[in-house]
Amino acid sequence: MTKNQDPNDSSPLKPSRPVSVVIFGASGDLTQRKLLPALYALRCEGFLPDHFRLIGNARRDYTDEAFRDLMREGVEQHGRHAPSEEDSWTDFASNMYYVGGTLEEAETFDKIKQKLEELEANDVEESIRLYYLAIPPSAFPIALNNISEQGLSVPESDRFRVIVEKPFGVDQETARVLNTQVHSAFSEDQVFRIDHYLGKETVQNILVFRLANGIFEPLWNRRYVDHVQITVGESIGVGRRGGYFDQAGIVRDIVQNHMLQLLCLVGMEVPIRFRAEHVRNEKVKVLMSLSPLSEVDIKTSVVRGQYAEGVVDDERVTAYRYEEDVNPETTTETFAAFRAYIDNWRWAGVPFYLRAGKRMKTRTTEITIVFKHPPLALFKATHERIPAPNQLIIQIQPEEGIKLRVGSKRPGTKFSIDPVQMAFTYEQSFENAPPGAYERLLLDAINGDSTLFAREDEVDYAWRFVQPILDAWQTTDLCPVHPYWAGSWGPDAADRIIERDGRAWRNEMPGEEPTLT
Ligand SMILES: NC(=O)c1ccc[n+]([C@@H]2O[C@H](COP(=O)([O-])OP(=O)(O)OC[C@H]3O[C@@H](n4cnc5c(N)ncnc54)[C@H](OP(=O)(O)O)[C@@H]3O)[C@@H](O)[C@H]2O)c1
């Protein structure tokens, strides 16, 4: 198995062994929108071996043909590669099969096993078998139990892998129980807990940017960094996911996984090698170093909000409480903001401000590293204001790129300083569009490279950090739910947690240039 491929190795990651993928939940939204388009893109770009086959399972009744048609629709609507290249689609589709049946019945797994054995009968080498749990989290335990009971997995074998979708538990306790269930069928190195943020090019580029350029890493510490901001803003509301979201809230949906992963990549120490074990060790250390939030911290430095009605993208939208399948009395948060500290040598005393929200002014995911001012304001006499500090802005969506804000002399007779920007976007700098996150992650899982997946202890420490917030919100009246207008940057209370430290959120629309004064 090609484990933990060296990133400097640009050779294609096409597996040399046959590959069998089984998707549980093959009639669902995730399969249609993400998994099939990603697998087909991998096929078109030559990353799948000649001996590749896919088995889909769900409760609905399909023939192989009907299933192939359904998958084709998904690829047509959501894929980077339209299935118009008849040859590759025909070949790809002819290796797709459907085995119907419920996850509760052992017979379903027996049928899948038989189908796998039939398809693999002529393989000259043992195939890799990848199981994808694209099913509701409530069905994870029974699926894992039946995979194990019916002999579809052999722990420790380098042949088997499982991808488990998020959410990984709803709190620390349930995540631990789920980890035990997963381990009843698979050993840890066979488990790939997916967080699709880690499949995004810009997210991976955080590490490359820090560690492959001599100029940034020396500045990446408390001596030069004033503070860090991470914003995950969505302009959409909960749409048709109201039932799920109202049980979850933004801390479980975004903060515990995506945001803490971003925090880890920004905050981690340099791994001794770019291998899964070392990268994940360093990420875990960041989570272990997060200063635990006391009840007082939660009351004073954590804000929860919920969107009221408002205007987003020129459209009037309803308040969260009136969304479909949401309890009109709900206190579930659609916004959260907080200040965190990484208590280690590198980051001691540097605040990390994080906020995530739905129905925000714009869709943006970005990390801003705000550097300290120079030690002496030399141009103070001619410049009426303190110039803006240098900022490094890592934009993850909508456009993927990196910007560096610096001060520059404004042309003229005085030493006036204006912010200017050096920027790169993937779109402008590289010819090819970056691969979708699921493409990268599926290929890594097939190849057994777990660098971009969350390890058991990573998930546990992430829950450990957010659990006191969730508990406090359940038990105290002193953490009010702050309403905010849909289409705004969140409640005023979120501004206060950063403003009282003499700082401000970077409330800029993506693509906005610095204003020259
Ligand atoms: N959709 C996304 O963008 C997204 C993003 C992140 C994470 N996820 C996670 O991915 C998983 C799937 O999400 P989804 O949106 O695709 O859900 P979905 O559209 O509701 O699909 C669920 C799938 O599971 C099958 N299923 C449910 N119960 C089953 C049972 N007892 N036996 C056999 N099959 C069963 C369904 O089959 P039938 O309909 O035929 O019964 C369907 O194919 C969830 O864990 C979700 O949290 C999804």
Image: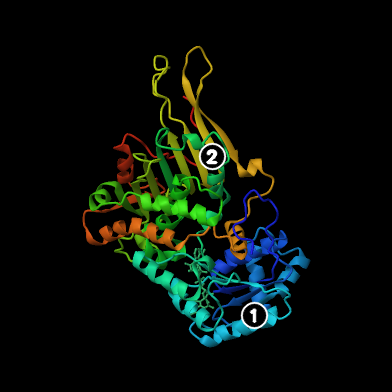
On the rendered structure, is 210 left or right of 373?
right
Residue at which label 2 appears: 511
* Amino acid type, residue under disc 2 in the picture: Gly
Q: Secondary structure at mark 1?
A: helix
Which image quarter is the N terminus in?
bottom right
Locate residue 33, reporting x and y percent.
58, 64
Q: Residue at x 46, y 38 (%)?
A: 220
Q: As drawn, is 15 to the left or to the right of 318?
A: right
Name the residue nearer the viewer: 296 or 375.
375
Is 142 located above or below residue 265 in the figure?
A: below
Residue 282 spot, x, y in % from top left? 46, 51
Tell me residue 469's x, y (percent): 30, 56
| Residue at the (65%, 68%) spot, across then down | 73
* Image position, residue 98 (x, y; %): 63, 79
Of residues 412 and 231, the one drawn nearer to the viewer in this rendering: 231
Nearest-to-viewer mark from 2 and 1: 1
What separation in Å lies between label 2 and label 1 (alpha carbons)?
Answer: 49 Å
The image quadrant of residue 480 is bottom left
In this rendering, the answer to whether 500 lies above or below 297 is above
* Pick the front one: 412 or 180: 180
Q: Earlier in the sequence, mark 2 or mark 1?
A: 1
Badge number at residue 6:
none
**Taking 423 as reference, is 138 above or below it?**
below
Q: Residues within 10 Å of mark 2 (few under 14, many from 20)?
A: few
